[in-house]
Amino acid sequence: MTRNDELATTLDEVERVRRHTRAAVHPAWFPLVVFGLLGLASIPFSRIGEGAGSALFWLVAGPAGGFATARYYTKRAIALGAGVRGRAYAALGVALFIAAWVSGAVTQSAAGPMIAVAIGYLGFARLERSWPTAVVAAVLGVAAVAVAVTDPDNGDIILALVFGLAFTATGLVLRHRDPVA
């Protein structure tokens, strides 16, 4: 083996370890499953009081899901000895929560909060360098814009189903690919 071959082999190994470490430290699947399931669980609440039930559900479920995700990432970081930049994730999560609340209050529609969620998850996709998260966020964004433009009956349920099913399914596929799970 020549020196160039040894160098190429070493660089290939370093790249493989880098990819494995990134995948282990950035498990995008967990928040997708948590919030996808919460999205599905929110559907019955959308029938209560012109959206008030949904708003109250997310007032409790949003922070609870964020706490569960933070706890998961913290435990995983301790177990692996490496973790993510928690402050960036926390800041983006708080901004997403506020943007969703404000857009819901302003638009009085489920489309506004879902557009905020889609934009927030594009930010998470960037932090995690996760193209599947970006794709599912884009799908939600397109669905939210379509509901905003067409204003169908039960648009809130349509969006909750798209959100819940797309996020949960994507998260479960990513979990299957997680090298640590």
Image: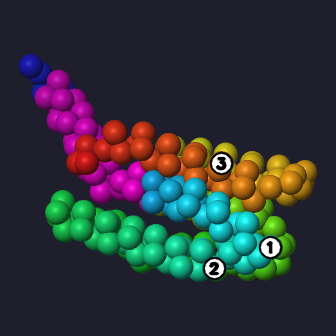
- Disc 3 to disc 2, C-alpha distance: 20 Å
Give the residue type that dot 3 points to: Val
Label 1, residues with CA under 10 Å away: few <14, some 14-19, many ≥20: few
Q: Quadrant of residue 95?
A: bottom right
63, above or below 157, in the image? below
Mark 3 lies on a secondary structure that is helix
The percent coordinates of residue 91 (x first, y second) are: 51, 78
Q: Give left or right: position of 156 versus 118.
A: right
Q: Are marks 3 and 2 in contact (CB under 8 Å)?
A: no
Q: Residue at x 73, y 66 (%)?
A: 47
What mark, if any, has residue 50 been given in the picture?
A: 1
Q: Which residues are magenta?
A: 5-31
Residue at (49% x, 43% y) in the render: 170
Q: Amino acid at mark 2?
A: Leu
Residue most extreme to the top: 1
- The image position of residue 87, as x and y in percent, is 42, 77
Q: Which mark is residue 56?
A: 2
Name the quadrant containing residue 80: bottom left
Q: Earlier in the sequence, mark 2 or mark 1?
A: 1
Instruction: Kindly state the secondary structure of the residue where label 1 is placed.
Output: helix
Q: Name the one closer to the observer, 9 or 26.
A: 26
Between 129 and 105, the one nearer to me in the picture: 105
Q: Earlier in the sequence, mark 3 or mark 2?
A: 2
Taking depth in this image into account, of 99 and 81 the one nearest to the observer is 99
Q: Nearer the viewer, mark 3 or mark 2?
A: 2
Q: Amino acid at mark 1?
A: Glu
Q: Which mark is residue 162?
A: 3
Residue 49: percent from left, percent from top: 77, 76
Q: List x then y, in percent, for residue 3.
A: 13, 27
Magenta-drawn stretch contains 15: yes
